[in-house]
Image: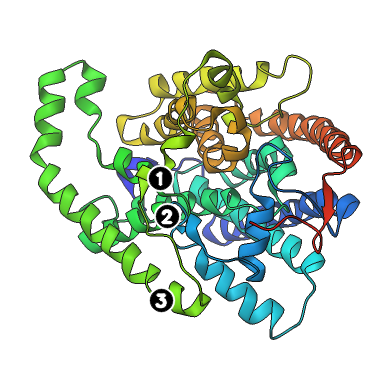
Amino acid sequence: MNADVMGTRQGMVSPARAKVLDAACFAVVVACAAIVAWMAAVPFLGHVPDQNAFYSADTGRVYAYLSGKTDGYYRMKVHPLYGWFCIFYQAIVVKTFHVPASIGIPALSGAISVTTCGLLYAVMRRLAVTPVAAASFVLLFCSSATYVFWSTLPETHMLAGASVLLAVLIMTSPNGAGQNIWKSAAAFAIGCSIVVTDGMIWVLRQIDFAPARRGDVREFLQANLAKSRLLFRTAALGVGIIYVLWLPEWPLLGKRAGLPFNFLEERHFVEVGASNSALTIHIFGLTPPGIAVDWLMPLLCVAAMVVALRVLTPRQWFIPLFALFGLALHTVYSGDCAFLFSPDYMPMVIVALALVAKERLPKWTPGVIAVAALLLLTLNMGEWTRQMDGVAATGKLMTFDSVTLH
């Protein structure tokens, strides 16, 4: 275990019983994640909001990519390795097992979402959160609007959240934070693999924030500039890994794949304005936009991230800072549909909340979190149904065969 991040576990039971408890909690997490995804999928199985009809989601484009019914995979410029999931889906699900899109795409999306929950549990255990507490906070994530709304729709961002969690697992393993250049480069590549801006999780993990905690600006700059050359080499190696893995996508998909990291073509999504900024807060998706006082829970999440910076060690600051980075980024980039991007950042919000609870809140906190998760699930599942019914009323809830392809 990585002692500088995790600290020391206290009050542990015997190793055998601890493993049983860990396995039981993990099983509960996976089962609950699958049940919630199923609950969200069943009322609308075989249907999907048309392109841009639901929080500007690319449901039509993602369906076209997965099914191969597209002229080109130009969005690979910002989702560079998503093509491998398209290759897998087309080769295994469609051509080998002949599963219809109405079943295969929600099943694939649900499997990715359940995997995200498993990785979230693993990250919290790596950071010395107890099994019961980790399970309760994963249940909170499963009950969030982020999970209920996006767990089974064809989109890229739940998979992006999984890639961020996997990068964190690598970076918090022994020699994973920069001492092993290949492992660190792999973490960078994984972080960028689905959504390129999620590579910021790697950048923040490399920064030495200890002098900043002491208020010593000069030492902060010196400490981080001293290792900047190594970090640039590591990042360049990570970019190289991305390109090596991206190159086979083009011939395997049989159509043009967009050049990764081509940010210039994204400039038309950049917009600054009061209304845009007000919607950005829904990057924290415990509850969805559209309910009464829909700003309250996201605002509490922002406050919790600020508290986390006071409570956590500087080696752990990258966790709440990544969530706050998402808020800052989407203030100027597609902020009007920030809720769409919440799966990228909500897992780190949950991890930060769990770490703060571990350090400062009573031992019975997991029980309170579990009850809150049940109440939140009731609210979010009802709102999910209401909003999807609203999409249907506008004629924009399509069957997979009739969804607009882009």
Secondary element at image label 3: loop
Circle 2/circle 1 CB separation < 8 Å: yes
Q: Nearer the viewer, residue 194 or 302?
A: 194
Closest to the observer, 76 or 231? 76
Residue at mark 2 to residue at mark 1: CA–CA distance: 9 Å
Q: Residue at 15%, 18% (x, y): give it.
A: 216
Of the numbered discs 3 and 1, the one sitting upstream in the chain is 3
Whichever of labels 2 and 1 marks the residue nearer the N terminus, that label is 2
The quadrant holding residue 300 is top right
Residue 322 percent across, percent down from the top left? 42, 35
Disc 3 versus disc 1: nearer the observer: 1
Direction from residue 320 to residue 173 in the image, left or right: left
Q: Which residue matches tag 2?
A: 77
Instruction: Give the residue displayed 58% in from the left and 75% down from the top.
Output: 88
Mark 1 residue crowding within 10 angstroms, few (<14) / some (14–19) / many (20+):
few
Name the residue at 69% across, 56% down: 30
**Amino acid on which disc 1 is placed:** Glu
Quarter in which the C terminus is drawn: bottom right
- Residue under circle 1? 265
Q: Is residue 199 left or right of residue 47?
A: left
- Whether residue 149 is visible to the viewer of this picture, yes or no, is yes
Per the model, the C-alpha gap separating discs 2 and 3 is 15 Å
Pick whichever, 380 or 400, lies toward us: 400
Please, which residue is most extreme toward the front here? Answer: 71
